[in-house]
Amino acid sequence: MTDTTAHDPARARHENARAAGVALEWVLRDTGAEASLRALADRKEENQ
């Protein structure tokens, strides 16, 4: 597969941001923080 990001800085930034988001999602899920953040968000919605 050819690296199309080498000559397209905007695409490279997009791909890097997507990869960072995926990595963060994995960390949150693996540490149990995802459930805690969802619970906090649910409580915030209930209080509004």
Image (tube, helix red, strand yellow):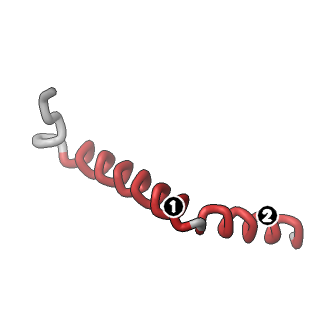
In the picture provided, is 39 more to the left or to the right than 9? right
Give coordinates of residue 29: x percent, y percent. Answer: 54, 59
Give coordinates of residue 32: x percent, y percent. Answer: 59, 66
In the picture provided, is 27 more to the left or to the right than 29? left
In the picture provided, is 34 more to the left or to the right than 38? left
- Above or below, comparing residue 16 to residue 42 in the picture: above
Q: Judge the density around disc 2: few (<14), some (14-19), many (≥20) Cα neighbours within 10 Å.
A: few
Q: Which mark is residue 30?
A: 1
Whole-angstrom CA distance, mark 1 to mark 2, is 20 Å
Q: Which mark is residue 43?
A: none
Circle 2 sits on which residue?
42
- Above or below, comparing residue 41 to residue 9 in the picture: below
Identify the residue at horizontal 42%, vertical 51% (top origin).
22
Quadrant of residue 36 within the rendered picture: bottom right
Look at the image and tell me in which quarter the C terminus lies. bottom right
Q: Judge the density around disc 1: few (<14), some (14-19), many (≥20) Cα neighbours within 10 Å.
A: few
In the picture provided, is 34 more to the left or to the right than 3? right
39 or 10: which is nearer to us? 39
Quadrant of residue 35 within the rendered picture: bottom right
How many numbered callouts? 2
Mark 1 residue type? Asp
Identify the residue at horizontal 26%, vertical 47% (top origin).
10
